[in-house]
Amino acid sequence: MAERVFPTKGNLLSTKKSLVLAELGYELLDKKRNILVREMMMMIDAAKALRGSIEATYKEAYAALQTANITMGVISDIAEAMPVDNSLGMTVRSVMGCELPKLSIEHKTLGIPYGFSETDGNVDKAYLCFDRVKHMTVLLVEVDNSVYHLANAIKKTQTRANALKNIVVPRYKETIRFITESLEEKEREEFSRLKIIKRQKERKKYRVVAKTSYEEKLAEQRPDPDSVM
């Protein structure tokens, strides 16, 4: 449906400019959507690979922990003695205006926080496996959150692009058509009016000329009073 505006050349030029901007906006949003989709597909592939690796590492770690519990009894005292890692940090990076979390955790040389005399190799193996799991979990959380934010950004971008393509652009085109047809109709009316005025002027001029010619003929046919005498 055309937007009801007063049909003037100024409004026609303004609407045409708005149409150009709307079409440009749609092209930019479509490019943004494609970039976001490509980024999300890369993240999904990375998440699949991480899930496979982290699942295998978790199995290895829990198997080693179970073996340690069997050989040494429940090792909850050793687990409680493990230091808390507070090196986790977060920054953000922007992809086409979409802010994605970027997690980081300090990679440092592992120190053994327990004594060797009271433990065996199964505890060491479980400790090393859970350390790998910790770093892999940080990466997986980063990727999963990035996929979530990208999916929301893609949905919003698609909604805006569809609104421009299916609502705004057709409305501007219909408005341009309405103004153009109205201006053309006014031009035809003005042309017809000018033709009528011109025809009336020509008729008036013709009448004046005809009247003048008739009066001249009458004057020529009228007898001279001196000749009659």
Image: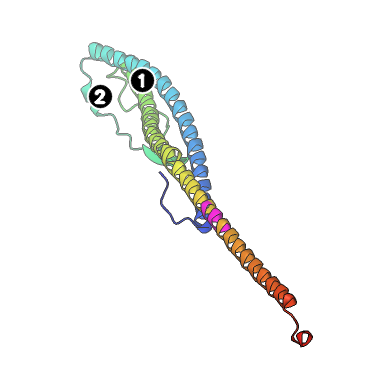
Disc with the residue nearer the chain's start (1 vs 2): 2
Mark seen at residue 140: none
| Foreground disc of the pair 1, 2 | 1
Q: Position of residue 68 (x, y in %)?
A: 27, 14
- Coloring scheme used: rainbow
Q: Please tell me whether the stretch drawn in magenta is mainly helix, strand or loop.
A: helix
What element does badge 2 sit on? helix
Q: Which residues are magenta?
A: 185-191
Q: Quadrant of residue 226?
A: bottom right
Residue matched to label 1? 129
Using the image as rendered, state which of residue 117 and residue 151 is in the foreground: 151
Q: Position of residue 51 (x, y in %)?
A: 38, 20
Res 104 seen here: no
Res 112 seen here: yes
Disc 2 residue type?
Ile
- Quadrant (top left, top right, bottom left, bottom right) of the N terminus: top left
Q: CA distance from mark 1 to mark 2?
A: 16 Å
Disc 1 residue type?
Cys
Residue matched to label 2? 78
* Disc 1 packing (10 Å; few <14; some 14–19; many ≥20): some
| Residue at 75%, 76% in the rendered image | 220
Q: Quadrant of residue 126?
A: top left
Using the image as rendered, state which of residue 208 and residue 154 is in the foreground: 208
In the displayed orientation, state which residue is furthest to the front: 229
Q: Quadrant of residue 192?
A: bottom right
* Disc 2 packing (10 Å; few <14; some 14–19; many ≥20): some
